Amino acid sequence: MSEATAPPIALPATDAGRRNMSLLIQLRWIAVGGQLATIEVVNGLMGIKLPLAPLLGAIIVLIAINLASLARLRGGRSVANRELTAVLLFDVAALGWQLHHSGGLTNPFASLFLLQVVMGAILLTPRSSWAVVAGAIVAMVALRIDPTPLVLPQPYAADPLALYLKGSLVCFLLIAVLLVAFVTRMSRNLRERDAALATASQRAAEEDHIVRMGLLASGAAHELGTPLSTLSVLIGDWRAAPRLADDTELQEDLADMDAAVGRCKSIVSGILMSAGEARGIAPQLTTARRFVTDIVDDWRAGRLPGTLDFSDRIGPDVDIVSDPALRQVIDNVIDNAAEVSPDWIGLTALRDGEMLVIEIADRGPGFDPEMLETIGQPYRSTKGRPGGGLGLFLLVNVVRKLGGLVSADNRDAGGAVVRITLPIAAIARGEGRRG
């Protein structure tokens, strides 16, 4: 069976460049729309003639930069700091070009350079941020060199300062709105980054627990192999001893002991197989229905007969490769349910599209709300004993490595239910279906 892994968590350091580029693209679209609207208002409604060719040319360049940036994001690779610096410097140059052809520093929208500087300070490294500052200063100095003045018609020519103040107010509102939108989006990105870091840290801690428990289980399995084999031989000798052959009651006890030792040896073999140490043992080919049915039959035979109520709603069967680790953790969940609900355990297997769902229900006291919020975290248990809570922890991690999910809830009728959802593609072999 090909190994399936859980969906990877995007590392914040790798994803930050792409998020920042996406943010610049959105702000640039807003800037393009605002510039087109401004040109229409000033040139059309106010009657102030503008040099449309250079102004619209700059807008076309900004659109081209956005389209190139979108194509760059679709490539799937991370975005470097130098790329963000380059596009911000292009923005500074485009703004300088437009201001040069619309009055230079006398244009009230010259303050928009501040927006570029703030974005550079937040998005870029310190050295690159200073490069954007230097670019803005160079652009403002260049605006003093032979800018194209605006010819103001009446009544604006009579009081140009009033027009400048109105333009400055519009520029201030524009900068304020864009900065709020920009900072709000950056704050959300930071929260998502912190959440991703916390998730990655939690997963690393859980995987460290898995490694340590795997080493402990593997070592214990190796150590138990020899004494279990010795016990099996001794029990066989006792059962064949002439002095004990006629003692029916003792023979029954010895048979139970032999069965218990055999089950212990099977568990040890399963642990070693799950750890990849069972040399020469081929994977077991089975079907989804047989996989679940075997778990139910073995549990009924070795635990509490008549307790486990099995409902088969799988429908059309599918060929799969049996995963010993998955089987073991499902056994553990059923055992946990039996501890709190020895009279009844419900196991339901069903198909939900391309997912195999296994639900294990009980009539016990249910989960505490805090337990439901931290389902699958190690050493969190309602049983109050040291080392408890590992059953669900192992279940969550084994299922997660197969690309599945584990959820838990309390039943309306009392008790709890643990739901295991597995993608069939992660455990299936081939495409054959069985009716």
Image: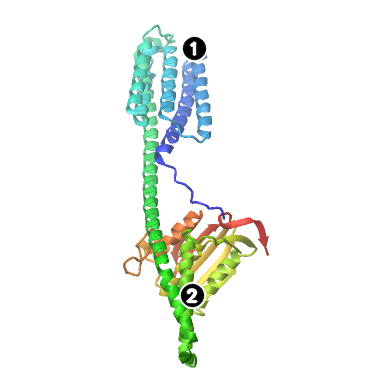
Q: Residue 108, located in which quarter of the rendered image?
A: top left
Picture quarter with the N terminus: bottom right
Per the model, the C-alpha gap separating discs 2 and 1 is 92 Å
The outermost residue toward the top is 146
Picture quarter with the C terminus: bottom right
* Kind of element beneath mark 1: loop
Vertical placement of residue 189 versus 56, above or below: below
In this view, the residue in front, 227 or 26, is 227
Q: Residue at x 54, y 68 (%)?
A: 348
For disc 1, the neighbor class at 10 Å (few under 14, some 14 to 19, many from 20) is: some
User: Could you tell me if residue 35 is visible in this image?
Assistant: yes
Amino acid at the residue labelled 2: Gly
Q: Position of residue 319 (x, y in %)?
A: 62, 60
Tell me the number on the disc at residue 262: 2
Image position of 123 (left or right of 1): left
Q: Residue at x 47, y 69 (%)?
A: 267
The outermost residue toward the bottom is 246
Q: Residue 257, located in which quarter of the rendered image?
A: bottom left
Vertical placement of residue 11 versus 372, above or below: above
Vertical placement of residue 5 versus 421, above or below: above
Q: Residue at x 54, y 72 (%)?
A: 296
Q: Position of residue 352 (x, y in %)?
A: 58, 59
User: Could you tell me if residue 361 is visible in this image?
Assistant: no
Amino acid at the residue labelled 1: Pro
Tell me the number on the disc at residue 272: none
Q: Which residue is label 1 attached to?
A: 51
